[in-house]
Amino acid sequence: MKNNSNTMVIFGGTGDLTHRKLIPALYQLDINGFLPEGLNVVSVGRKHKTSEEYRNELRESVKKYSSRSFTEELFNDLAQRVEYFTLDFDTQKDYDSLSEFLNKREKEGKPENRLFYLAVSPDYFGKIVDCMEESGITGGSGWRRLVIEKPFGKDLESATALNSSISRVFPEKSIYRIDHYVAKEMIQNIMMLRFQNSIFESIWNRSHIDNVQITVLEKEGVGTRGGYYDHTGALRDMVQNHLLQLLAITAMEPPKSLDPDDVRDEKVRVFQALKDCTAECTDGNVLFGQYDGYRNEDKVPEDSRTETLVAARVQIDNDRWRGVPFYLLTGKALKNKTAQVTIEFRKMASLASDLKQEPNILEIKIQPDEGITLHLSVKKPGVIDEMVQAEMDYCQSCLYLFNSPDSYEKLILDAMTGDSTRFTRWDELELTWSFIDSILRHAKDNVIPKGYEIGSDGPVELDSFIKSGSGKWWYRNRTSQYEYNL
């Protein structure tokens, strides 16, 4: 990995994301031997402190947040690569000083490649990029890549403006827009399950599938994020990125290859086939909910109509999926934390009128359990013919004891190696924001969110939301089958 040696410049080095995710991910990559040999880290923050003080803070963060055991020797191997640099995001001369600092290090033999990671509020994205360009930080020899966290805009107009600002400095191939959810192990497994198993790919279409359910549910409320969340809501916060990316991965055509652009081209074709919402289509096809007590959360207005739950029935207008509803559901303060993709297959014609038959169900479980379960109808042992459900189960959590790599491990390594497969291309964002805007235009301001109790399954209206196949949300039947002693 010597060709991928680089200086990783983290803007927001003292922030929560850096301490909870980025540095622990680097530590875990180092443990497994995946860090480029010459990697160096320059953490940029507004607070004044020495590099030694900063490393001591990182030690505590790694102890607290890393999923791997902490050892002083391994941490010191990472810590010696890390330096801290004080910078005010609004002060151009600080960027000039950072440029001089980086140039001096490179003259001393540090890597000339630079990976810029914006672990800051989106309000600073454009400002930081402009100041970096003016100071010359983005120029010079070696490659230059920019990693950006979500949210990328709040609608199509703001996303377009932000993209225009950033792409003026960085070409599209050098912009790595993170959706950490896409890097989860079982989401990546969806493509392998489909495209490497002929028994699934041959029936992965409207002739055999009745509906698809994509659910990402959380037990926690908005907590301390009330001020941010009330200007965003579940539709922008979760559906625009996580759920629509899951939809694209589930519904895409087989790519020509695993080349990043071939994979992302197929996702784009799915988004192009999404039917935009009109005033008529939102009626009965989009449901907003708000948990009781949301308006009492910190920095949330007493009259807020922001949704904390969204259910949507969407259609993909292409030959593979025409007529198959995709049900999307996400929400906060619910009974269970769970994420999964559920494929409900069409029922077979019954051999006898008295045989009770359930549809075949394929569950791709993303969290908290990781695995795949296929539900089959089989004959119950006995002297009479009676059907029961049997499960064929692949429990990844059991086999690997939750040792799947963290999403940020994969994404940071991919950015360093130049693999953009798991990152969002601009044309994907443009299409998903256009779709979300179509819902916002016709539904958001005209619909009062349905109330639901904290710790429940959501609004009662969800019970009759699915109007195809068995008419039920399959995630509700789930219980964790396994106990772990970790």
Image (cartoon, rainbow, N blue to C red):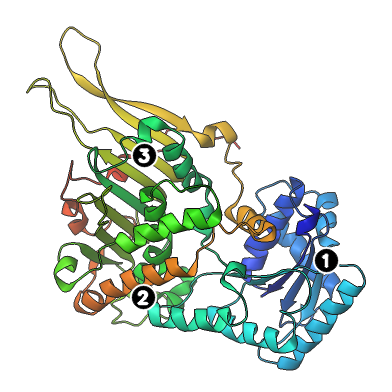
Q: Is residue 198 above or below residue 65?
A: above
**Does residue 472 lie above or below 284 as drawn?**
above
Q: Earlier in the sequence, mark 2 or mark 1?
A: 1
**Type of the residue with mark 2:** Asn
Q: Report x, y in % for residue 335.
A: 35, 52
Residue at mark 2: 296
x, y percent for residue 204: 32, 40
Dot 1 falls on a residue whose secondary structure is: loop
Q: Do the residues under discs 2 and 1 have CB atoms within 8 angstroms? A: no
Q: Residue furthest left?
A: 353
Residue at x 53% of width, y 37% of height:
397
**Disc 1 residue type?**
Pro
Foreground residue, 485 or 117? 117
Q: State the residue in front, 299 or 46.
A: 46
Q: Is residue 111 above or below residue 188?
A: below
| Horizontal side, residue 160 vs residue 460: left or right | right
Taking the spot 85% from the left edge, 70% from the top edge, the residue there is 52
Crowding around mark 3 (Cα neighbors within 10 Å: few <14, some 14 to 19, many 20+) is: many
Residue 363 - label: 3
Residue 197 in sight here: yes
**Which residue is disc 1 drawn over?**
111
Which amino acid, mark 3?
Glu
Crowd class of label 1 (few under 14; some 14 to 19; many from 20; radius 10 Å): many
Q: Nearer the viewer, residue 437 or 296?
A: 437
Secondary element type, mark 3: strand
